[in-house]
Amino acid sequence: MRIYLCTPENFFTEDSAREKLRLDLCEALKNFYGPFPSKDIEFFSTNDSQPCLCIMEGTLKKDSDREVVKAVNSLLPSAEVKLNYQRLDPDFYPGKPEAPAKPFTPSPSSSFYPSSSPSPASPSSKDEKSSEEFNYKELAKNYQAEAPHFTFEQVILPEATREKIKEAVATIQVEEKVFDQWGLRKIIPYAASAVTFYGLPGTGKTMAAEAVAAMIGKKIIRATYADIESKYHGEGPKRVKAIFYAAQRDDAVLFLDEADSLLSKRLTDVSHGSEQAINSMRSQLLISLEHFRGIVIFSTNLIINYDQAFLSRLIKIDFPMPDSSARKIIWEQHLRGDGIKIPLAGDIDTETLARRYSFSGRDIKNAVKDACVTVAMHNSEPVTQKDLIKSCEKVKEEAEKIKNASDHTKNSYSDKKILSPELKNSFANIIKEQVKARTHA
């Protein structure tokens, strides 16, 4: 066993109190992990305001993770408890240990030092490792939960999609009944609800994530691959830990957009440090998902790029393109919804617009915005059906251009024969002459 108890400075006023807590913790934990020597529990002073107990390894003999936490909190009510923390950070070592009541010199085989270290490291290197460990908590300050912008009533989705979202959210809402009263926590310690929304761009995935947070009365933390990826080796896993820590800290829904970059297949032929860093980040994401107690929502346009290890852990919810009736509702919301004050002409016909243009919700939003901006620029109020149709045609034309666009990163001659046969023969003859001249020389 390796167990680290990190406490604030001057937490213990007497050595006897520290040694008593060591024995009490050992007695409480052996009910779950079996007997182990009390010296396996090491004490460290940190700058944190609350104690933190890190149980690095060990297999539970009985009961669940929650029972272990309860046992520790009965001795240290305010302590944060991290179980099997070696999986999360195999090299974790809090820093310079507190001096024990009596001098203690560990042998090279002692569990006082991490198993990855053949000999005790200098105090300065331990302090550096402590700094690295708690660095992710500092990084977590960059991620702050915010109030959601949309409600579930504002999101226009097929009924089947709405029901599947509600079922996923219910995992959290009935957590106590299913996992504690019915005992499922014995086989599923962490009641996380990890969901992936997938579908074409503009089909309401981001709005739905916000609506989920509003529905359960929580804030939301939004992030993309760009917020997590780093050019510095080893920073990616720390940022993954940081963002999950922030969501747990704020009791918020975690929404990760552009998830195909995060959850894509791990690299098997790894030869560069950057490739190793990507794999480390994705492995850390798997671990964080296992331990996170809350709702995580991934969003992607390319679910086919997901690694199967991630895909098997996620509830998959498809966001189809809206049909004609759904499009009519979306048009009405954007033109005449609550708080909307667009000056509209009497000829506006949303049913015709919905039937004529097979747009996504985002396309409709862009068409309305373009029509309003154009009318306002020319002081030609009100907005007419003709203005909306003109904007719809513009949106449609832009979509066609993007669909048919060529790859401008390639040379225009990449698919053509650059050299004519005559020129090739000329070069071949020149090379032969040069070879012949060198041979005779």
Image: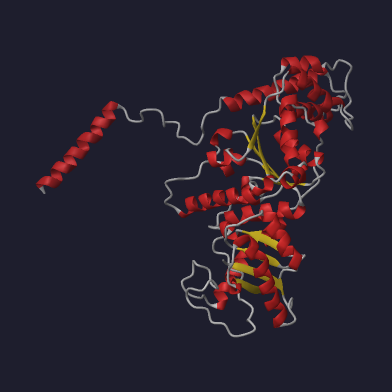
**Pick the front one: 104 or 266:** 104
From what the image shows, is residue 26 above or below residue 281? below
Query: At 60% from the left edge and 28% from the top edge, which residue is drawn?
Result: 402
The image position of residue 56, as x and y in percent, is 59, 63
Specify the quadrant of the image occupied by residue 200: top right
Q: Does residue 18 appear in this view?
A: yes
**Pick the front one: 276 or 217:** 217
The image position of residue 139, as x and y in percent, is 67, 59
Q: Does residue 191 appear in this view?
A: no
Q: Residue furthest bottom?
A: 103
Question: For this view, does 105 lie left or right of residue 242?
Answer: left
**Pick the front one: 45 or 135:** 45
Specify the quadrant of the image occupied by residue 13: bottom right
**Pick the front one: 313 or 266:** 313
Question: For this view, does 217 lie left or right of residue 292?
Answer: right
The colour scheme used to paint the residues is secondary structure
Query: At 53% from the left edge and 68% from the top edge, which residue is drawn?
Result: 114
The image position of residue 358, as x and y in percent, is 69, 19
The image position of residue 220, as x and y in percent, is 76, 46
Query: At 71% from the left edge and 28% from the top edge, which residue is drawn?
Result: 161
